[in-house]
Amino acid sequence: MARPKIALIGAGQIGGTLAHLAALKELGDVVLFDIAEGTPEGKALDIASSGPSGKFDATMSGTQDYADIAGADVCIVTAGVARKPGMSRDDLLGINLKVMKSVGEGIAKHAPDAFVICITNPLDAMVWALREFSGLPHEKVCGMAGVLDSARFRHFLASEFNVSMKDVTAFVLGGHGDTMVPLVRYSTVAGIPLPDLVKMGWTTQDKLDAIVQRTRDGGAEIVGLLKTGSAFYAPATSAIEMAESYLKDQKRVLPCAAYVDGAYGLNGFYVGVPTVIGAGGIERVVEISMNKDEQTMFDNSVTAVKGLVEACKGIDESLA
Ligand SMILES: NC(=O)C1=CN([C@@H]2O[C@H](COP(=O)(O)OP(=O)(O)OC[C@H]3O[C@@H](n4cnc5c(N)ncnc54)[C@H](O)[C@@H]3O)[C@@H](O)[C@H]2O)C=CC1
Ligand SMILES: O=C([O-])CC(=O)C(=O)O
């Protein structure tokens, strides 16, 4: 059977890391697409040359021509601009919306059967716009954010408790912005919910609150440290987890920005929710019950994303 084809639209920091991870995990052959001449070709050659020592079989190529993504099984989109210190993700909306238009049209023309994972920020509005521009089925277009935000939460919790990250579960829902919703009640160590761990004296409510806030600020913390761009190792690893679940029909339960139509009282809206990812794409949106506080936080986050979607419609009339 032929290897799957993975098209990476954007060959910058995340795109290059995605290509390397896809190769090391032998998920398929990789095509890197970027408007910056030489960048995708150079990264493809560099990663391909790591194959003999990395011990993988995968072809790598770089291109500026959308025709080369033809027949891709998965497209992961990182094309656009990343923020710098002092900026919010939302400041990227105008510039990255234009990029989503050309990417959406390119995918629609050359890889209409692909499972598309958008990473470009501001994530929830960009994945909505990318779906609109591409016209692909909603279940085949999603956004990566919840896996990353949950991974950060798990990392901080594991450090606090001095336990393996493997035994920590966490769910972060809502939009990928300041209003994201780390769900403490649904986050556990070996199945024990965090509120119980506070009662058991493993940590204090104040420390847990600080970890929740650090999770919300996780992207900005790294932007402040790097100064020239934003996080890329963890974002790429998170998207690869989603791509792998699709390609291998693993049916992983992963939080991602998915089209929600009916669940959570939403009618046709992209926001971070738990999903099942398998060969059908987003096969299911998992609706969990929320208490009053959680619902209020989720509603605030939905309102923030709605504002960004409206801003997109104001910029590009074809979206209105
Ligand atoms: N959803 C999430 O959780 C996260 C999202 N991000 C976002 O991902 C995006 C990419 O981040 P990085 O890879 O660090 O940025 P980067 O600047 O390293 O790479 C972006 C690449 O996109 C290319 N590009 C620009 N316009 C293009 C177009 N029209 N067509 C094709 N390629 C184009 C650029 O030449 C550049 O190589 C940013 O918007 C960033 O904010 C970053 C981290 C996490
Ligand atoms: O913070 C940023 O600009 C990039 C991002 O979305 C993240 O790392 O969570």
Image (cartoon, rainbow, N blue to C red):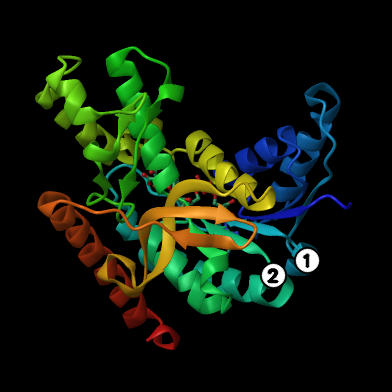
- The mark nearer the N terminus, 2 or 1, is 1
Q: Whole-percent x and y of residue 244?
A: 64, 45
Q: Contact, CB < 8 Å: mark 2 with mark 1?
A: yes
The numbered disc on residue 279 is: none
Viewer-proximal residue among 58 and 81 = 58
Residue 104 drawn at (x, y percent): 58, 72
The answer to whether residue 126 is left or right of residue 305 is right
Please give the name of the residue rendered at 41% of the width and 32% of the height, measured from the top-left corner.
Answer: 226
Tell me the element at label 1.
loop
- Residue shown at 78%/66% (left/top)? 71
Say which amino acid is labelled 1: Gly
- Dividing the picture into quadrants, the one containing residue 36 is bottom right
Q: CA–CA distance between discs 2 and 1?
A: 7 Å
Kind of element beneath mark 2: loop
Q: Position of residue 277 (x, y in %)?
A: 55, 54
Q: Quadrant of the C terminus?
A: bottom left
- Residue depicted at 32% across the width and 81% down the height: 314
Q: Which mark is residue 113?
A: 2
Q: Indicate whether 22 appears above or below 78.
A: above
Residue farthest to the top, as pictured: 162
Q: Residue at x 25, y 64 (%)?
A: 302
Q: Is residue 58 left or right of residue 21?
A: right
Q: Is residue 149 visible?
A: yes
Q: Decide which of 309, 300 is in the foreground and name it.
A: 300
On the picture, is 208 further left or further right than 84?
left
Eye-nearest disc, 2 or 1: 2
Residue 71: image tag:
1
Q: Is mark 1 within 8 Å of ligand 1?
A: no
Q: Is residue 12 visible?
A: no
Instruction: Dividing the image into four quarters, tell me where ligand 2 lies.
Output: top left
